[in-house]
């Protein structure tokens, strides 16, 4: 499709195909198409999102043996047809994978992955089929002896006959060798499927038998001794019988599965879909794509959108894509982007078109999760040179034909994307036609984005509330594009600034300025002034944000102080209440004791007076005021950290011994830190200490004249260092550089390799041995692809052929 080519969606499909494990999955990729049904799009995105979460979970999903047996099963529908041995082997492995997939969604996964669980619950196939397949073919693709009783007897006879042949021919060959009838280096051979003895031609009559072959020089003939002819014939008949029995076994298996072919076809459709969803989810992880918020209306509210292909390309160069934030609503439906050439306008346009197309094809897109995405019935794009020699059309004529189709078919559910609108012809007429087209599309309430350099299109936003301007920002100081979209103000083409930077003669620029006129230059200057004012406003906003954060910090500090005082107040009151309660108890006891003593002394006057005096003294003691409680001051609640002078020595103040050069031991100013200078880059120095490297300003370093970095360790540091070293030594003692990955799933194997690589780097190991087996090469390919991307890996290669060859990967670490 031409639209997919323009949007580069065809490249997205190619990348998805590379992620597929089966031909069925690749067919699903080929069948991807643009959809407009909101419920279907939502389901496709949700299923892909569920699989993305599966890949991020620790519970690995089956990722091997995704064979597609659909065509083989359709062939087996005919009575009398039988499955061949290779297809049977692939069916066994793939049915096992299907069973594992179905089992995966039975492990209480319905809450986590409801849509995929529903798909899995639709699939049924007889377990007896897989059980029988396991009986008649082993994990190496061979039919075992016990596949049937008859095959067991035939194989036993073959072994017995073969042994008899070997013994007889060995005896005859030994006699011939002894009699020097054979060449000196001769051995028993096989010719035409028969065991033969090489004889010197002159001794051809020494052994009776059939001549099966002769050497090129005719000096040697190959004789099948008459004594073993009958045995060889018997062996050949047994081999024919073996083949017939295997065919019978395969035919019986075909008859077994024939009634269930419809169920099996559904199962393989499910396996293909799982492969397809897995490919979509893996691609989503590579481009940091997510499922956004979906709305069944026409809208675009994207935050931090990135072009996936540009993201992958720049990632290889260790660069980042400048994200795009764009909004189109019913009230603001058309965006006109202006700005300098090579400033990112076309990339912006393609990003919007590609991501919307991907979304409606059921693919996750690289935006923030809170971004809002709507659904459009049609996407229209006009970009690039579409000159047609066959139809005798110029670029502009082709452009006008596209505009004609757009204007005729557009409605309120159309998204249009037009690059360099109005260009390709005389500017005044082209600008006027472009303006009329945009006004027509605006009247139809269509949604769209157009890029332009024409001033009349930039002014449309002043006349129509649903049209807004956008500008690709430009660094006027360094005269280079910033690739950032700023919505709200039109952009300048910066033609004169760019021409000046390129070095166009001053007199030419002056002459051009006079031809353009002051009004145009004034308009461009106003645009620049507006941008400067906007940046100043943003700077003020940043300052206000900092002030607001400081105020919030003070408020939090006050609230913490208030809460602490309130807590202490509550504690004091509770303590006072407890003491008061105790005082009352003591008072009651005192009074009761006094009354008891008075009674016991029969109210003697002198004793009564003494008792009253003691009671009055007790009451006076109770009447004394409580001590005043002083609440802690703020600086007591938030004390400044006090330096432990006994543990932290004051920084030394050495004399500066002159200019600093590479290799010097220097001290970082106002600290006790000593480092080594390993490079000087202008006004900065690259320093190193204990294998750590960083860059610091040169004027913060003081030359010391020391020959090596002093070692200063506190007791805590020493203990920590010893602890770390003990831990490392323990790990090193039990560390094994060899790991067996055979039989592991890909995700499980990669996790093991990653952990092994991390431990090896920690323990300074230089070589690892990964045993993954040969098989179909998938595990080896994935592991080596992972190793290729690891900076710690210097190189890797297969083991020597005699020690395992391609089944083992030797990894050399830096």
Image: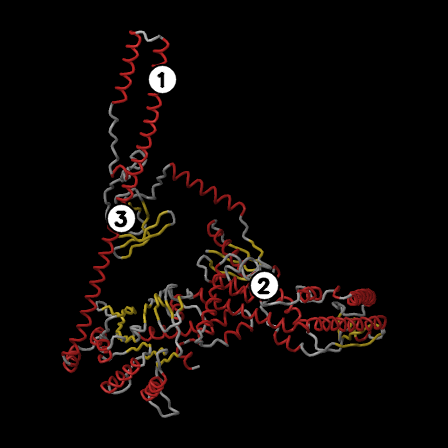
Q: Is residue 370 above or below residue 404?
A: above
Callout 2 secondary element: helix
State the CA–CA distance, disc 2 to disc 1.
Answer: 84 Å
* Label disc, if present, on residue 404 of the rendered structure: none
Where's residue 96, x and y in %? 62, 64
Disc number for residue 102 = 2
Expressed as whole percent of the image width and height from the top left, the position of residue 79 reads 71, 78
For the N terminus, give its image quadrant: bottom left
Q: Is residue 119 left or right of residue 150?
A: left
Q: Residue at x 29, y 68 (%)?
A: 484
Q: Height in image: 755 above or below 140?
A: above
The residue at which mark 1 appears reads as 592
Name which quarter of the figure residue 522 lies in. Answer: bottom left
Dot 3: within a 10 Å radius of its alpha carbon, few (fewer than 14), some, or many (20 or more) residues?
few
- Local packing at callout 1 (Cα closer than 10 Å; few below 14, some 14-19, many 20+) is few
Labels 2 and 3 touching (C-beta < 8 A): no
* Colour pattern of the rendering: secondary structure
Task: Looking at the image, tell me whether mark 2 or mark 1 is earlier in sequence order.
Answer: 2
């Amino acid at each position: 499709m031409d639209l997919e080519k323009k949007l580069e969606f065809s490249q997205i499909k190619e990348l998805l195909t590379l992620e597929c494990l089966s031909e069925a999955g690749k067919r699903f990729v080929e069948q991807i198409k643009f959809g407009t049904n909101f419920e279907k799009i939502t389901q496709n995105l949700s299923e892909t999102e569920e699989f993305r979460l599966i890949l991020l979970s620790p519970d690995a999903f089956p990722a091997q043996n995704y064979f597609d047996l659909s065509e083989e099963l359709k062939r087996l529908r005919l009575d009398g047809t039988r499955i061949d041995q290779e297809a049977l082997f692939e069916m066994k492995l793939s049915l096992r994978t299907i069973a594992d997939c179905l089992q995966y969604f039975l492990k209480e996964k319905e809450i986590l992955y409801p849509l995929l669980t529903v798909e899995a619950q639709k699939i049924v196939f007889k377990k007896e089929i897989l059980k029988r397949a396991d009986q008649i073919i082993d994990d190496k693709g061979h039919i075992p002896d016990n596949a049937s009783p008859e095959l067991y007897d035939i194989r036993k006879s073959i072994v017995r006959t073969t042994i008899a042949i070997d013994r007889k021919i060995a005896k005859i060959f030994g006699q011939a060798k002894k009699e020097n009838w054979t060449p000196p280096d001769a051995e028993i051979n096989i010719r035409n499927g028969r065991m033969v003895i090489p004889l010197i031609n002159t001794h051809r009559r020494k052994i009776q038998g059939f001549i099966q072959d002769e050497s090129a020089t005719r000096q040697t003939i190959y004789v099948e001794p008459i004594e073993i002819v009958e045995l060889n014939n018997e062996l050949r008949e047994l081999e024919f019988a073996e083949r017939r029995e295997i065919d019978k076994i395969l035919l019986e298996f075909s008859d077994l599965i024939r009634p269930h072919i419809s169920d099996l076809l559904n199962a393989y459709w499910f396996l293909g879909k799982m492969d397809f969803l897995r490919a979509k989810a893996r691609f989503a992880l590579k481009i940091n794509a997510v499922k956004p918020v979906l709305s069944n209306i026409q809208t675009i509210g994207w935050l931090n959108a990135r072009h996936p292909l540009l993201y992958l390309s720049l990632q290889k160069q260790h660069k980042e894509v400048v994200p795009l934030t764009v909004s189109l609503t019913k009230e603001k439906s058309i965006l006109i982007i202006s700005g300098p050439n090579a400033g990112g306008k076309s990339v912006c346009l393609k990003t919007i078109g590609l991501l919307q197309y991907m979304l409606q094809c059921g693919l996750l897109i690289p935006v923030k999760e809170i971004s809002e995405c709507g659904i459009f019935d049609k996407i229209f794009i006009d970009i690039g040179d579409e000159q047609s020699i066959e139809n005798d059309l110029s670029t502009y004529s082709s452009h006008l034909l596209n505009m004609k189709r757009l204007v005729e078919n557009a409605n309120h559910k159309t998204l249009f994307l037009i690059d360099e609108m109005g260009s390709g012809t005389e500017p005044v007429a082209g600008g006027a036609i472009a303006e009329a087209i945009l006004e027509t599309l605006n009247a139809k309430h269509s949604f769209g984005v157009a890029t332009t350099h024409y001033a009349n299109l930039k002014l449309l936003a002043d006349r129509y509330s649903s049209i807004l301007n956008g500008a690709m920002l430009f660094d006027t100081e360094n005269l280079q594009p910033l690739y950032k979209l700023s919505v709200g103000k039109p952009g300048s083409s910066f033609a004169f600034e760019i021409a000046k930077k390129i070095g166009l003669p001053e007199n030419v620029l002056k002459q051009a300025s006079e031809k353009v006129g002051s009004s145009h230059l004034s308009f461009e200057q106003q645009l620049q002034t507006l941008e400067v004012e906007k940046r100043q406003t943003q700077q003020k906003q940043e300052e206000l944000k900092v002030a607001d954060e400081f105020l919030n910090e003070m408020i939090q500090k006050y609230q913490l102080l208030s809460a602490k005082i309130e807590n202490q107040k509550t504690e004091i009151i509770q303590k006072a209440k407890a003491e008061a309660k105790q005082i009352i108890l003591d008072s009651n006891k005192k009074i009761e004791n006094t009354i008891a003593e008075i009674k016991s002394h029969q109210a003697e006057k002198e004793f009564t007076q003494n008792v009253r005096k003691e009671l009055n003294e007790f009451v006076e003691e109770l009447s004394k005021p409580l001590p005043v409680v002083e609440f802690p001051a703020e600086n007591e609640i938030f004390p400044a950290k006090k330096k432990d002078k006994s543990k932290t020595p004051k920084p030394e103040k050495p004399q500066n011994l002159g200019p600093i050069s590479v290799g010097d031991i220097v001290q970082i100013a106002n600290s006790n830190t000593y480092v080594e200078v390993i490079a000087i880059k202008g006004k900065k120095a690259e320093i190193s200490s204990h294998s750590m490297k960083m860059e610091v300003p040169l004027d913060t370093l003081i030359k010391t004249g020391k020959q090596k970095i002093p070692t200063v360790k506190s007791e805590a540091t020493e203990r920590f260092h010893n602890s770390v070293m003990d831990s490392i030594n323990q790990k090193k003692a039990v560390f094994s550089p060899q790991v067996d990955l055979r039989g592991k799933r890909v995700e499980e194997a990669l996790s093991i390799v990653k952990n092994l690589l991390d431990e090896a780097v920690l323990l300074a190991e230089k070589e690892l041995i990964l045993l993954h087996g040969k098989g179909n090469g998938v595990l080896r390919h994935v592991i080596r692809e992972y190793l290729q991307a690891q900076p710690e890996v210097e190189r890797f290669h297969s083991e020597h052929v005699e020690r395992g060859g391609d089944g083992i990967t030797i990894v050399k670490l830096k």
